[in-house]
Image (cartoon, rainbow, N blue to C red):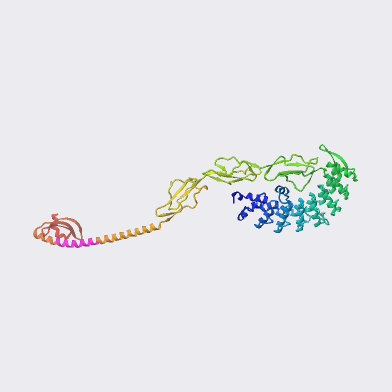
Amino acid sequence: MDAELLDSSLFYAVCCNGSMDLFNEFPKHRMLEFLIEKWKYLHPIHIASVFHNYKILRELIRLEVDVNLQTYDDGSSPLVLAAGNDITEYIEYKGDDLSENMREKTIEVLLENNGDINLIRKDGASPLYVACQRGHVETAKRLLEKGADINLGLKFDAGPYGAGVNFCPKNEESPEYATCRNGHDSTLEPLLKNRPDINLIRKNGETPLYAACEFGHQSTVQLILKEGARGEVNHCRDDGESPLYVACKNGHDSTVQLLLKRGAEINHETKCGLSPIDAARSNGHVSTENILLGNGHIFKMDHRPVSVDRWTTIIVIVLTNPYCSLAIICHRPIVTLPLQITTDPYKQILQYNESIEFGCVKGYSISGDTVRYCTQNGTFKLNFPTCSAIKCQPPSLKYPLQITTYKQIFRYNESIEFHCAANYHIQGEAVRYCTQNDSFQQNLPTCSVITCQRPCLSEALQLTTDPHQQTYSYNESIVFNCSPGYTLHGPSIKYCLQNGDFNKRLPYCSVNRAQDTQQSLTVAILAGCAIGLVVFSSATIVIIITSRRLRKQKENVNYEEGIRQSEDKDHEYTGIKQQSYDNTASYVVTGETPDNRDHQYTELKVKPDEWTKTDALT
């Protein structure tokens, strides 16, 4: 398989495109690597559901993907996404199956695989609600057939409206309300068949009829009144606004005429004392005012012109009513992405001097004043702020810090990676991201020179390098060896690494056992030889001493005989005194022996009185 196809973005693009040929190019054993969140909190199952690619959806479900997996941002399930999205333009571009048909097949696949038909978003919208909101008739019918809860809708301070009054049981905005607000008549019909009570009321008192009148959906109003809401034609909101009032305020003439025919009270006033004709006049709807005048509107005497900031308008002042205010309203403006309005998304009407605030979606920065106010002419100041895509330029760097992934422009949340030049070590996080303020995160990493400290060595382990060198630069080597009688284990060369340390596992030395045995044997032999030599020397000395003693005894006898012989023959002997002990004298004498030969006697022992004459000779 080509390396490019392994890029994670390609798999998500295939889920968007719906090509089974490309999908099958991905090896099955690698599929699990791509089943993760990618585009704006979307997983592959969400992307396939949004674009109604039901064939790929089946394959993903076979991989045991959670069919009810919700997105992290708003909690949309695959069924909610499939029910609400419209891909008509996309289908026309592809020339493929009909959009409606693909949507129904996608929903069928999800329901067949235990998709939760009533799993709602964080704002309370159910699959049925979004289908009604978008006007997908067949989808709404299918969901109703499968048991969709018709009471689920948008959460917005839901609660009972009053005893004996029908209200949205769990949510503020019911599917019927969303359908009427958007004028989807064909979607409303199956809803009415499943729940004929169309008079469900929001907490602020608005009914589906009020929503249809507010946006001027005449056919929807006619359908509602036909289905039994005639008695609710004069039901008002909490502030007293009736369906006729809101239709007049927005200048929906045909809707006004229809309501008047169905019995709407033409002179009904709000809590501020404003009637439908006041609403038409304050918003400049002359044709609507004429319709009311032609249908029996009665003027009251408490109307008077008032000038406010150079604008002249007809307002109603009821001094005894604390609810009264200027009858100036502004409709919530329509903006296109990436520009968005960040204030209450469900507030469509704003009073005079109320403000709205603008913002941009993630990845875009806003330019211009972000706040606009409802002006006295019933509009917001134009020239809305604009949004531009966030672009970060690479930061300027100083050597040795360098960029690994270099581009001229980085989009929002794109990352840039840093590294250091050779012989330098990076300190700090190496990755930075393009932020909302058009720049990368501050506090870039720094580089420091790589140095390694001289390692601590065991007694036998030694270094062959300079013994006084304590630091080493990057990639510099040291060489180890062992003391005599030891064997080195491990590599003898280590290098200074990029983390500022040598390889952590240094070599070690162990005693050479064979040499130790040889040395012990040598010592034993030498010791044996020494002992033998001592014994031999001692024996030799003993033998010599014994031999000398025996010889001395023999010589003494001969000498004594020689003395006697010398006296007889008048021989003279000379002697030198050597030692005196035990009343004896030891001499070395030289003379002629009886056999006329010269002899030298050593250690001749005689008594002193026998040497008197001889001693005198010395």
As for residue 62 lying within the magenta part, the answer is no
- Is residue 549 shown to the viewer in this render? yes
Q: In x, y percent, where is residue 483? A: 41, 52
Q: In x, y percent, where is residue 541? A: 25, 60
Q: Main secondary structure of the magenta part?
A: helix
The reply, left or right, for residue 451 in relation to residue 4 is: left
Locate residue 550: give its quadrant: bottom left
- Find the residue positioned furthest to the front: 95
Query: In what quadrant of the picture does the C terminus appear?
Result: bottom left
Q: Which residues are magenta?
A: 542-559
As for residue 558 lying within the magenta part, the answer is yes
The residue at 52%/44% (across/down) is: 422
Locate residue 416: give its quadrant: top right
- Find the residue positioned furthest to the top: 310
The reply, left or right, for residue 424 in relation to residue 582 is: right
Number of dots carrying numbers: 0
Which of the pair 547/509 is nearer the observer? Answer: 509
- Is residue 167 shown to the viewer in this render? no
Q: In x, y percent, where is residue 16? A: 67, 50
Which of the pair 548/343 is nearer the observer? Answer: 343
The reply, left or right, for residue 33 in relation to residue 609 is: right
Q: In x, y percent, where is residue 108? A: 72, 56
The reply, left or right, for residue 360 in relation to residue 518 is: right
